[in-house]
Amino acid sequence: MPAGLKRYYGNNDLHFITFSCYGRRPLLSTARARDILVQELARVRAEYRFKLVGYVVMLNHVHLLMGEPVKGTPSTAMQMLKQRVSRKMRRNSGTVGGPSSVGAPSSVCEGGSRAQLASRLNEDDQEGKPFWQERFYDFNVYRSGKVKEKLNYMHANPVIRGLVAHPKDWPWSSWSFYFQKGKGLLPMDWID
């Protein structure tokens, strides 16, 4: 592990995790790309058995508020998630910008057409660029006030970035679960 990067596991803390696309490129700029990430998050969550308290998928990064997995550590779960998403995106690069199962307005799907994104993915493959930045940022959360702060931060992120006017308009977050009676793409785990 690089100098200065410390992970604190084993205390059953929640972890506020942030990971980014390589070079902060907007590789999650299509509804289809964000849908793939959410689908893979659900699979990894079930396999590694961790609580998911909140999330938001942005155009070039992801925030998660998660518990420690029963199987492995947050590091192993994040490694698996990132690998699965990048493999699926590269394998399906011809359909990365295809229709979303969610059906977000086209105004929030920045980054160009399906062909442009597929071209970027293929160019990056030829240049040997990875899909994700190495590592991820991990902040242990153990106070309820900090949990609320992190959830508010995640849910406000699409609004602050100018993608939507209100968090309800960004389906790729846990906002709908908390504020629309359990609706949303993924169910969240309530914490005491």
Image: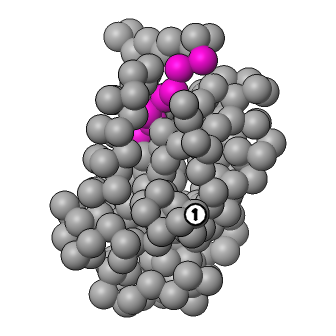
- Could you tell me which quadrant the C terminus lies in? top right
Color scheme of the displayed model? one colour
Towards the viewer: 132 or 151: 151
Image spot of residue 127 (x, y percent)? 47, 57
Q: Quadrant of residue 49?
A: top right
Image spot of residue 96 (x, y percent)? 56, 78
Residue sitting at 45 percent across and 36 percent down?
Answer: 17
First to last magenta residue range:
12-18
Q: Is residue 126 visible?
A: no
Residue sitting at 47 percent across and 57 percent down?
Answer: 178
What residue did someone put label 1 on?
182
Under tag 1, what secondary structure? loop
183 vs 154, left or right, is right
Residue sitting at 44 percent across and 20 percent down?
Answer: 142
Image spot of residue 164 (x, y percent)? 27, 75
Judged by its main secondary structure, the magenta piece is strand
Q: Tag 1: Cα neighbours inside 10 Å, few (<14), some, or many (≥20)?
A: some
Residue sitting at 29 percent across and 47 percent down?
Answer: 153
Q: Is residue 48 magenta?
A: no
Towards the viewer: 99 or 171: 171
Q: Name the kind of residue labelled 1 in the image.
A: Gly
Towards the viewer: 143 or 81: 143
